[in-house]
Image (cartoon, grey):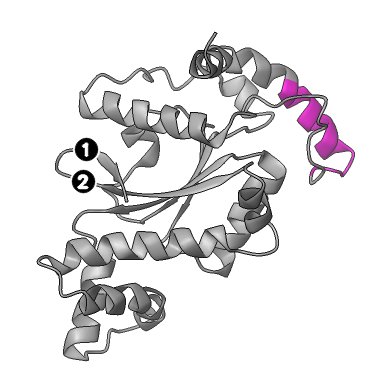
Amino acid sequence: MCEICDQNESRLSRRHLLGFAGLAMAGFAASGTFLTAPSPAQAAPNAIKPEAALKLLRDGNARYVADAPENKDFSAGRAARAQAQYPIAAIVGCADSRVAPELLFDQPPGELFVTRVAGNFVNDDGLASLEYGVKFLGIPLIMVLGHSGCGAVAATIKVVQDDITLPGHLPGLVESLRPAITAAIAKNPADLLIEATAENVRQNVAHLKNANPIISEYVGDGRVNVVGGVYDIATGSVNLV
């Protein structure tokens, strides 16, 4: 049987595995050792290779684009999810209300570990969340997900080009996005917003791949991969960058 078939079969039995593994995780929490990684002898439901996790996301997005989702019963697996979580991927997404990772990847609750901030960049708090997901939840894949028409990226472009000042705490957000926007401007692209959005994704992917001490180690030995994508709100498609 091929590897992808094995992974699909594994996924079909996740609800049953979640029930058993969830009881074990509940025991960890009760004993005050909830930060203890699962025993290697007990393979978690999300113990799949990064490429298999990426295939699950891409297949789910294809179903979303075709308006043929598999996931419609969101109460299924609720009891198991109350005990533990075994997400197949972490998503670094934008806070934009039109970007809903579980929907656009056609994944049920419990499959995606999502961190969101306007502009989908990684700061120290986001990095800590991802480190937790990788080390203690066994997440094999991280995707940095930008999207078309990103307001945070567009606002940063305006700040950089027109030297304006935004109110409140928005200047801090702009500073996090500025390196990608500056790099995109230097390329003199035909569409600056499109290029800046992709460049922001690429820079955050590179940042995560080299993030010491945890994620870089997992990336280095192949347990985790970090990829980037851009979601086209108009078509629903996610394209890797």
Q: Looking at the rendering, in which quadrant would you find the N terminus?
A: top right
Q: Relative to residue 132, is residue 153 drawn left or right? A: left
Looking at the rendering, the stretch of residues picked out in magenta corresponds to: 21-34
Q: Position of residue 169 (x, y in %)?
A: 39, 80
At x 25% / y 19%, what residue is drawn? 68
Disc 2: which residue? 232
The 10 Å Cα crowd at callout 2, few under 14, some 14 to 19, many 20 or more, is: some
At x 45% / y 58%, what residue is drawn? 205
Q: Position of residue 72 (x, y in %)?
A: 36, 19
What numbered label is drawn on residue 182? none
Mark 1 residue type: Gly
Q: Relative to residue 107, is residue 215 drawn left or right? A: right
Q: CA distance from mark 1 to mark 2?
A: 5 Å
The 10 Å Cα crowd at callout 1, few under 14, some 14 to 19, many 20 or more, is: many
Q: Position of residue 122 (x, y in %)?
A: 48, 64
Looking at this rendering, what residue extends furthest in the top direction?
Answer: 1
Residue 75 vertical placement versus 95 (above, below): above
Disc 1: which residue? 236
Q: Relative to residue 24, is residue 125 drawn left or right? A: left
**Closer to the camera, 110 or 214?**
214
Helix, strand or loop for disc 1? loop
Mark 2 residue type: Asp
On the question of residue 43 being in view, the answer is yes
Find out whether the residues at labels 1 and 2 contact each other: C-beta distance under 8 Å: yes
At x 58% / y 16%, what residue is drawn? 10
On the question of residue 119 being in view, the answer is no
Is 29 in the magenta?
yes
Residue 4 vertical placement versus 118 (above, below): above
Q: Relative to residue 148, is residue 173 drawn left or right? A: right
Helix, strand or loop for disc 2? loop
Q: Quadrant of residue 175?
A: bottom left
